[in-house]
Amino acid sequence: MSAPATGDTTAGRARISARTLRTDRWWVPPLFTTMGLAAFVIYAGIRSFVRTAYYVPEYHYLTPFYSPCLSDSCVPGSSHFGTPIGALPGWIPLAFLSLPFLLGFRLTCYYYRKAYYRSVWFSPPACAVAEPHGRYTGETRLPLILQNAHRYFFYAAFLISIINTYDAVIAFHGRTGGFGFGLGNLVLAGNVIMLWAYTLSCHSCRHVVGGRLKHFSRHPVRYWLWTQVTRLNNRHMLLAWITLGTLVVTDLYVMLVASGAFPDPRFVD
């Protein structure tokens, strides 16, 4: 058999002499995936650095892109855990302690790996489509060997989800103090619920609650937890995309209210 015109020639890898054997529009899903991921990265990147309209002092609404805000550069009231860090230069995000871990959690997520391996790196772009790479080393070398740190990013994401939950709870604040409830609370709470669903549906979480057990019957509590996480895990891909949307919607809502574009509809104030 002659060498393929494109694709990986490593032993054990499929050899495809044509660019593709597909007759359908196989490139549409990778294209949409790339566009969706790029749109979120661009929006989140811009919003993480602009340092404007990220907190509504009247109701304690704080966008998740700035939580936790621990610097003296944070606007008054937005530092729910104090300001142990001094002023930061503009090129450092105010949530610099959480954003790298959240980015690492998403980048090493099993679903996102599949998504950007296929759509961005074309490894492979689709079934029966030759990939442009001449070698295949998997996740055994830098930088992809860092994917093995996913479980540790999960622990950090779990802690950050607790912080986001705290932000959502203290946002039930009235204009003059005490309990208050508005549309923004629904947005913040909905985002937190989805973030918890995505975080707990992680494959690492499934291993944490049910891994290394030889007999589920001897550990009924962990078995029950494992079954619940498994149910969420079946929807991990859907939750991965939903949470990208809820993060953008939550940040956009807080930004619009904080900038005075429209008032937050209040149910209890």
Image (tube, rainbow, N blue to C red):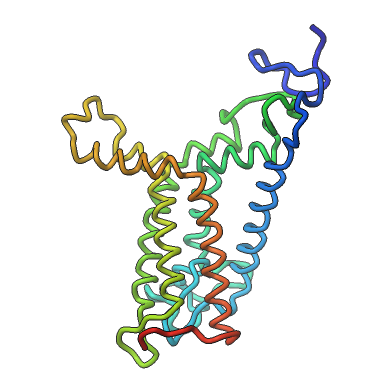
Q: Position of residue 182 (x, y in %)?
A: 42, 80
In the figure, 214 relative to 176: above or below? Answer: above
In the picture, the quarter occupied by the N terminus is top right
* Image position, residue 33 (x, y; %): 66, 47
Q: Residue furthest bottom?
A: 176
| Residue 33 placement, left or right of 201 | right
Residue 266 in the image, given as x and y percentages of width and height: 42, 85
* Rendered position, 59 above or below 94: below
Q: Is residue 131 left or right of residue 180?
A: right
Front residue (pair 186, 110): 186
**Image check: 217 left or right of 134?**
left
**Which residue is at a point 24% across and 25% down the rendered structure image?**
214
Q: Name the residue: 44% across, 87% down.
A: 58
Residue ranking furthest to the top: 1
Q: Identify whether 268 is placed above or below 135.
A: below
Measured from the top left, where is residue 126 in percent x and y? 68, 31
Residue 18's quadrant in the figure? top right
